[in-house]
Amino acid sequence: MTKLSTTLLMLLFSATAYAQSENWSTVADRYHLSAYLVAILLIGVFVLIFSNRLYYYREQEVSNRAKQLNTQLALVLNSNKTEIWTYDTTKIFTHISSETVTRTFYAPIDFSQFYNHDDFGELRTRITNVLIENSLSETLLVRSYDGQKTYEINISVLKRDQKHHPTMLLGIQRDITESKRRGEKAHNLSLQYQTVFNSSLVDMIFYGPDGRLMDLNEKACETFMIADRESFLKKNVHINDIPSYRHINIHELYDSIRLSSITDIDQVKREDERIPDIKLGGTFYYEAILSPIRDEDGKLHGVMAAGRNITEMVESHHKQEEEVQLLQQTNQQIQSYIQNINYTLKASGVRIITYHPGRHELRIFSDLNQVQYSLSQIRCVSLIHESDRRRLRGLFMRMDQGKAGNISEVLHTIFRDPQKRDVYMNFSLIPMTDKEGRVTLYFGLCRDETEMTYTEMRLMEETKKAQETEELKNTFLLNMSYEIRTPLNAVLGFAELFNSPHDVEDEPVFAQEIKRNTDELLNLVNDILFISRLDAKMVEFPKAPSDFATLFDGWCYMGWSALNPQVKTAIDNPYNHLVLNIDEQHLGQVIQKLCTCSANYTNEGVVRAKYEYHHGELNIVIEDTGRGVKKELLPHIYERFFKDDQNKISNTGLDIPIVKELVEQMGGQLEIQSEQGKGTTCYVMIPCEMISREKKTEIIN
């Protein structure tokens, strides 16, 4: 580039010199003009090349700077175990990788797979609080899906619109698993220290780095006959005030030393005022071990003295023998008591159980001395029937939080008794607290209540059978008489018009209305009969392998068959093939009825359907941008013949109740969210077994 610039400048100077050497009369001829044009063209080329190179170098500099900043950001995020994600009002989560600083977009249903189900629900609640400005920011702890990690998440507003409403939220997520474990470990060590210190059978005395008395346990108070421990600690006793330790320099003490002493307490009191005011007297025999406590740098943090009074052992060996004999008798009584308890536990089938919130571990004892099972939370949940697993998770959460109060629950297990019946176990636990009132352990019993439970179930079943016949009859008659009159009266009315004076041209209108109301009456009667069968639990749900991916689109379009032509449709089908073990007929009926409801409530905008399969559960979402339902009417949407704020019924008025009953009897859940003027979203979650799948290729930017 430098050589080219020099050449162009030389040509320019040569042309200028040549022009000066010529007469001005010849400068303007065509030859000179051509030379001028060439010079100008070369100058323009030079300027363009120079500008291009300058822009290129600046672009490279900016790119290198951006890469450097991204690398620095990645290092900061990795070093702090921090991740960043955003959430905007379109309900899209954007995750920023801490390694490559790239973005990945997730829908809420996909983003929820990274967290515990209950914790993600709390996260959504906190996001809503910030969006509606109930809170400027929110901080909460969430667990990963497998429960192995714990995150601290801070949610704040990142962007606002012109009206100062939040449009995008920033989530800063920090992995605090290790710090939490260290805290728990430190807490457990502290509890162990306090337990050993306070429950030790020997005197435990702690002196600070300056030699002043800092703490002593109850055994030491008993040995030295100290009535008021707190008052004694306030006397500011120094280790060298103790006659046996006056020659010891604790700053030169690096290893533990064992001391034995014989002290005439009465004589020392008379000769030395430094001895603490204690009630001991006479000759005192004592042995102790002094252990310095130093850190890795050798700095002294204190001295621990562990000792015991051996006066009685020295003065009265016979008395010690009597005490040993008494101790043996006591041990025999304790062993006999333990044997009786163990026999009672074995004969009654009752087991002792303990739960440690810190370790999240449930232990089952076959007797007082033997642990029969040590079970984690996940293992415990796997042994409980699916119907009670959520309740058990709630109990574990309550105990992990150290809630006070007794716990007594009967849980349905996966085991069978010799009569091939499901086993029901009663768990009764009480909290054990430390001195600060914090729960450290839950202790209790578990016993088999299968016989009692089945007796109660039989009584309830017989009572229920006696009531069901009357309830089914009343429900059927109520459903038949509630909404059936309107289309029936319309049919009769238009039929009578044929017998009254009328124009022949009106007869097609009469016939059309009779047909429309007859169809409506037929659909209503079919729905009433079907929901009556659902109420009576007479509908069977046979499962068979079905390719859900090939059926989903057809079910949606059948439900949208009466959709306003101005409304756009969208279906997100992420699979080429997804073979599930499902009840194809009733699941298709659920999807069609939800799509029909969305079509009835949407006159413009978009209706959308999508699904995904995660961890043994099929998640289906039907959403629209229709008129929606008022907030105060939303709790009544599952009621039969529900009417909206315009006093209108969607289709026959039984679609949503039928869908709810179908989903629940298939073992799933239905959730409907709606906001007036913004639309409605229906969530369907069906547990099912996946046989095979083929997912469409996805490209994530």
Image (spheres, rainbow, N blue to C red):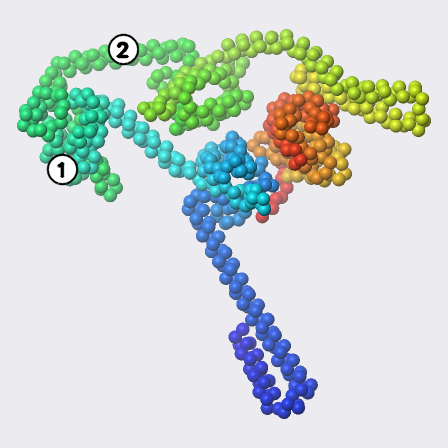
Can residue 655 be seen by looking at this rendering? Answer: no
In the image, residue 663 sits, relative to residue 253, either above or below, namely above
Evaluate whether residue 442 shows in this view. Answer: yes
Q: Position of residue 340 (x, y in %)?
A: 34, 10
Residue lying at the far front of the rendered structure: 163
Comparing 96 with 438, the one in front is: 438
Q: Name the front one of labels 1 and 2.
A: 1
Please tell me the numbered disc located at residue 400: none
In this rendering, position of residue 646 left or right of residue 95:
right
Q: Residue at x 12, y 16 (%)?
A: 317
In front of the other: 464 or 260: 464
Say the numbered circle drawn on residue 333: 2
Residue 406 located left or right of residue 56: left
Task: Report the residue marked by disc 1.
Answer: 249
Q: Residue sitting at 48 percent across and 24 percent down?
A: 394
Please report the residue visible at 57 percent of the width from the left and 87 percent of the height from the top.
17
